[in-house]
Every structure is written in structure tokens, then in C-alpha cells.
Amino acid sequence: MTSSTTTGSAAGAGRDEGRAEDLAVSVRGLKKSYGALEAVRGIDLDIATGEVFALLGPNGAGKTTTVEILEGHRQRDGGEVSVLGHDPRRGELAFKQRIGIVLQSTGVEPYLTVAEVVDLYRGYYPSPRDIDEVIEVVGLKDKRDERVLKLSGGQQRRLDVAIGLAGDPELLFLDEPTTGFDPSARRHAWEMIKNLQALGKTVFLTTHYMDEAQYLADRVAIIAAGAIVAIGPPATLAGREQAATRIAFHFPAGAPAIPEELRGAPEEARAGDTMAAPAAPNDTVELRTTDPTRALHKLTSWALDNNVELGSLSVTRSSLEDVYLELTGGDEVEGVS
Ligand code: ATP
């Protein structure tokens, strides 16, 4: 555990203490059990107004339970929850009018056009957003008068988001917004979410994609077995920026043994371990170091002195995926950063 890791302490909940009125979401000690199963075990969370926040976690970690409690769709067993200043469990109309929810799929009338669907949902809200603005934000301008049944899967998903935006919510919950998208549709969806942020919306996102969280979120929280195990900006999550850098290359055929002194370059014991075994031609040699500049200098000097090519040389920082896997015990992830 590092300084940016929390396991449920109320202090800070992963960010500097902001003023209560700047917080879109504030959660303290949230608990929820299903019979003997403690699905959410006392979590703390603060989300600032205008922030894009991503909740990551393996299947069954407690994401849906948490999000649905915040949305007012599930009752909690304990803890304090404030969403836009409301306690969601009261189910107040004023609260429902200020949030937008995009579920994993929304069943909409297939014979209506995009504009008609958006207008239908606008009718449920006191101050809806302009139809064409909504359609533009989600990138469906060209499909404005197209019937829903003629939209592609990705376009229908964008329409789901348009529905979530129809009431001009201050806070939008997006549940796995790009699951099943092709790479280009994902990029479009990401731009759309960036547009939402530019409009000043707060976005609470759940995702299984590390690259999505990395690209979109100001902060991410990793939840595992009902507890938040890390929270912070993706670039520095759980001390990621201080973690060892990985240098990898294919050991060249005919090259002399890697010199002893290279073992001394990395501060990490693991690097010494890796380099201790004499590499066979075309083995991938992996070196971990907290001083990549020096280690690379020594390595490339050795390669140049010996006129050998370091095949597939790569230098990679500890990824969000590495952090995620470490904190969640190696559950599967999709997408890499
Ligand atoms: P996924 O990524 O698979 O959607 P999740 O992180 O959203 O998972 P939850 O759906 O919150 O996880 O579930 C947390 C735990 O609570 C799981 O073990 C799940 O089986 C259990 N659970 C969720 N809802 C119920 C319910 N209505 N009744 C009983 N157990 C439930």
C-alpha cells in the first residue's frame, strides 16, 4: 500500500478536502450486504463537481451495488451518502431530475426517430436540454431523423447517452459505456464523454477497460471485494509513477554475456535476479529499474561496444493495468495502457 492508497479512511477519501458544495458526490462508510455476503464494506468517496470519475473493479467487486445506491435504485445498510446534496434513498423528484443514468442498454421504441426519442425523454424533465444540442453532443447529427432500428449498435449506444442527457443533468452515470464497441466507435464515445466534461457535467463511469479509464478519468478508484483499494489520478495511482520501469529486449544471437555491471544499474533486486541467468539467443531479457536513464545508458553502451542489436527494445512504465492486477489479485482486465 502506498500513500495514494486508501482502504476506507474517511480522511480525504482520496482527494484534498474540498468544500462540501464543490462535491457532486460524498460517501462515507457505505455498507451493503446481501444476506451473509458483504458486497460493499464501508467505502468512502468524494467526487468533485465537473470531475470525470471512473470506478474499476473485477466482476462482483461491488461496482453496480455502489452505483445503484448513489442513483437511488438500491438501499444501503449503513453509511452516509450525499449526491448533489441529496440523500438518494429519499427518492426525491428534484434529485432524479438532476441526474442522468445510462444503463448498459436502454430499450427504446424502434420506429421513432432519434429526434423523437430525445424529445420524448425531454418531456419528463422541467428544464430539458435543446434537442439538437443533445444530438450534437453525442455525435448523431447525421442520424437526427433516422429511425432507431436503422442505427448501428454503437449509434444506439450514443442514443442511450442522449437519453441520459435529455433532462440536462448535472451528474451523469455511465455504466460501461463502450462495452462491445469497435475501436473507432470507442474513440467517438470517448470524444463524446470529453464533450460532456467540457459542458461542466460530472461523470461517474464504470468500466472494465484500463485505457478508457486512463484516457477519460480525472481520478479512478479501484474496488475489490467491496472495498476501495486505491484512488487517485490514473497517472499516479498507487505510487505508479515511482514503480519500476521495465526494459525488455531480445537477447541477440552471438552476443557476449551481459556484463555483471548491468546488474548493478537497477536499484531493484528483481533486475539483478533477471539478469543473473545467462540469456540464450532470442530470449526476452527483462530488467526492472527505478533508474531507467542510467540502466539504458549502460545497456546501450554495452550493445554498441559489442556491435549487437537489441531486438524489440522496449521501455515501459508500470501501467494502470499492472497496478490494477496487483491490487485486485490478478483478475482479468481488458485494454491496456
Ligand atoms: P460486475 O462487474 O460483474 O457487474 P459488480 O462489481 O458490479 O460486478 P455487484 O453487482 O455490485 O458487482 O455485486 C457485488 C456482489 O454482490 C457479488 O458477489 C454479487 O453476486 C452480489 N449481489 C449483487 N446483487 C445481489 C442481489 N440482488 N442479491 C444477492 N447478491 C447480490
Image: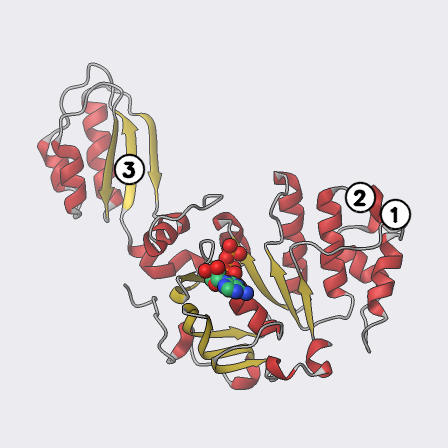
Q: Which residue is mark 1?
A: 147
Residue 151, numbered label: 2
Q: Nearer the viewer, residue 23 or 296?
A: 23
Between tags 1 and 3, which lies in front?
1
Mark 3, residues whose alpha carbon is within 10 Å: few (<14), some, or many (≥20)? many
Element at badge 1?
Answer: loop
Residue visible at 29% across and 56% down? Answer: 242
Q: Is residue 125 left or right of residue 52?
A: right
What is the three-letter code of the residue carrying label 2? Answer: Leu
Question: How far is disc 3 from disc 2 in space, using C-alphas?
Answer: 46 Å
Question: How far is disc 2 from disc 1 in space, using C-alphas?
Answer: 7 Å
Element at badge 2?
Answer: loop
> Which residue is outermost to the left?
260
In the figure, 37 relative to 322: above or below?
below
x then y, percent, for residue 74 = 58, 73
In the figure, 250 relative to 18: above or below?
above
Residue 247, numbered label: 3
In the figure, 214 relative to 281: above or below?
below
Cβ–Cβ below 8 Å for labels 2 and 1?
yes
Q: Nearer the viewer, residue 21 or 120?
A: 120
Residue visible at 52% across and 73% down? Answer: 47
x then y, percent, for residue 84 = 61, 80
Between tags 3 and 2, which lies in front?
2
Q: In the figure, residue 229 lies in which quadrant?
A: bottom left
What is the three-letter code of the residue carrying label 1? Answer: Arg
Count of marks placed on residues: 3
Q: Nearer the viewer, residue 229 or 169?
A: 229
Q: Is residue 196 left or right of residue 263?
A: right
Q: Nearer the viewer, residue 49 or 162?
A: 162
Specify whether residue 295 is in view: yes
